Amino acid sequence: MRPARLIDAPRLAALHETCFPDSPWDEAYWQDAVMLTVVEVAEQGLCQLRVAADEAEVMTICVAPEARGQGLGRMLLRAAAARAHGAGADRLFLEVAVENAPARSLYAKLGFKAVGLRKGYYAAGGDALVLARDLPLEEPGAGD
Ligand SMILES: CC(C)(COP(=O)(O)OP(=O)(O)OC[C@H]1O[C@@H](n2cnc3c(N)ncnc32)[C@H](O)[C@@H]1OP(=O)(O)O)[C@@H](O)C(=O)NCCC(=O)NCCS
């Protein structure tokens, strides 16, 4: 796991499409993303955050289906959040589909709390929870 570089754009596009088949984010998107945002990449996962002044937002996070449940998503988010904090962010926001139990569990483990609800946020009509927590990102008692 490491900060993504331009050379990673094809892998980032492929990984994202594997996890989100309707994703419009192609290689050109990811070339810009690695220059303009915080992108953490691993062989089988990625996490992208955008930093604006003292706030950051999770743009996307995904782990290849065969690599899920092994701690990679948590590590990617922690690494990206640490970089965002280093860039000046002291609060991290994200949106998650109400019915996305794995992602909601990950964020709850990391101490995120609901701060809003966006009805009909997704194109398919689902609602999004807005979650937030202060940075740096630490899990009380996790010891990892
Ligand atoms: C959400 C996602 C990134 C999690 O990645 P992951 O590598 O599987 O997660 P981890 O192994 O790091 O798990 C961290 C925590 O998440 C929760 N979690 C992960 N998978 C879960 C599942 N299938 N069911 C319930 N909780 C789950 C657990 O609380 C877990 O903590 P634990 O290991 O102490 O029990 C992954 O499921 C994914 O890519 N999903 C599809 C894309 C997506 O929905 N992205 C989020 C959009 S908001």
Image (cartoon, rainbow, N blue to C red):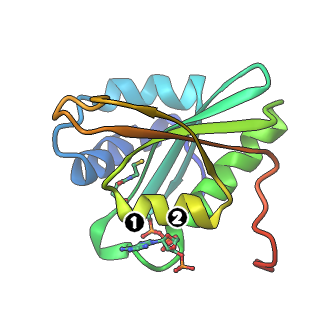
Q: Quadrant of the N terminus?
A: bottom right
Dot 2 falls on a residue whose secondary structure is helix
In the visual, does 1 lie left or right of 21? right
Q: Amino acid at mark 2?
A: Leu
Dot 1 surroundings within 10 Å: few (below 14), some, or many (20 or more)?
few
Q: Position of residue 17 (x, y in %)?
A: 24, 45
Mark 1 near ligand 1 (CB under 8 Å)? yes
Q: Position of residue 135 (x, y in %)?
A: 79, 45
- Which numbered tag is attached to residue 106? 2
Instruction: Work out whether residue 133 or residue 137 is closer to the camera in this orientation and state it.
Output: 133
Residue plotted at (51% across, 48% down): 47
- Disc sitting over residue 120 in the figure: none
Quadrant location, ligand no. 1? bottom left
Read off the residue under disc 1.
Answer: 102
Residue pictured at 74% horizontal, 43% vertical: 83
- Could one spot residue 44 in this view of the protein? no
Q: Quadrant of residue 115?
A: top right
Callout 2 touching callout 1 (CB < 8 Å): yes
Q: With respect to residue 25, does 113 lie above or below? A: below
Q: Is 6 displayed left or right of 132 in the figure? A: left
Q: Give the farthest residue toward the top.
A: 53
SS for callout 1? helix
Residue 33 screen position, x and y as percent: 49, 28
Relative to the observer, which residue lies in front, 141 or 34?
A: 141
Q: Residues within 10 Å of mark 2 (few under 14, many from 20)?
A: some
Instruction: Specify whether 132 is left or right of 46.
Output: right
Kind of residue indicated by mark 1: Pro
